Image: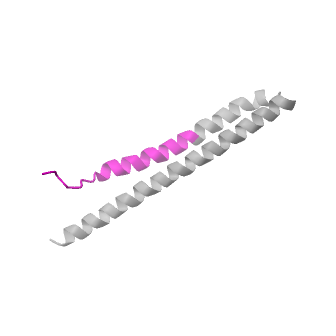
Amino acid sequence: MSDSRLVVNFAALAQASADIQRALGLLDSHLGQLERDAAPLVATWEGAAREAYDARQATWRRASRDLRAILREIKVAVDESAADYHDTERRAAGRF
């Protein structure tokens, strides 16, 4: 017979949420620093080289924006799950 219990680790859910938030901050920080570091070099480019870089950078920015949106959605899901599990546990405890 299999064990059909569901065990929720509230501390792990809280840590996952915090880790996702930290990852979002690091992503923003590192990408911002990369753009600041590249800016002096990029400023020297003209013509096709500059256009190619600008097009690629626009792609990177879209991908970054999409990744941040996905991470935010995951964080919301983790936070909502934790709240739902807390609520369920509180109601179950109230039955005793």
**Looking at the image, how many numbered discs can be counted on the residues?**
0
**Percent from the top left, x then y, of residue 69?**
56, 51
Residue that protrudes farthest toward the bottom in the picture: 95
Main secondary-structure element of the magenta-colored stretch:
helix
Left or right of residue 83: residue 56: right
Instruction: Please state which of residues 5 and 46 is positioned toward the viewer in this rendering.
Output: 5
Numbered range of the magenta stretch: 1-27
| Magenta stretch: includes residue 9 | yes
From the viewer's perspective, tell me whether residue 52 is left or right of residue 90. Answer: right
In the image: residue 53, left or right of residue 90: right
Residue 38 x, y percent position in the rendering: 71, 30
The C terminus - image quarter: bottom left
Q: Residue at x 56, y 45 (%)?
A: 67
Please say if 39 is above or below 17: above
Q: Is residue 95 above or below residue 84?
A: below
Q: Residue at x 72, y 41 (%)?
A: 58
Q: Residue 24 appears at what percent x and percent y?
A: 53, 45
Q: Residue furthest left?
A: 1
Identified at 72% across, 36% down, the residue is 56
The residue positioned 46% from the left and 57% from the top of the image is 76
Q: How is the image coloured?
A: one colour
Q: Is residue 39 above or below residue 58?
A: above
Residue extending farthest to the right is 47
Residue found farthest to the front: 1
Image coordinates of residue 84 in percent, x first then y, are 34, 63
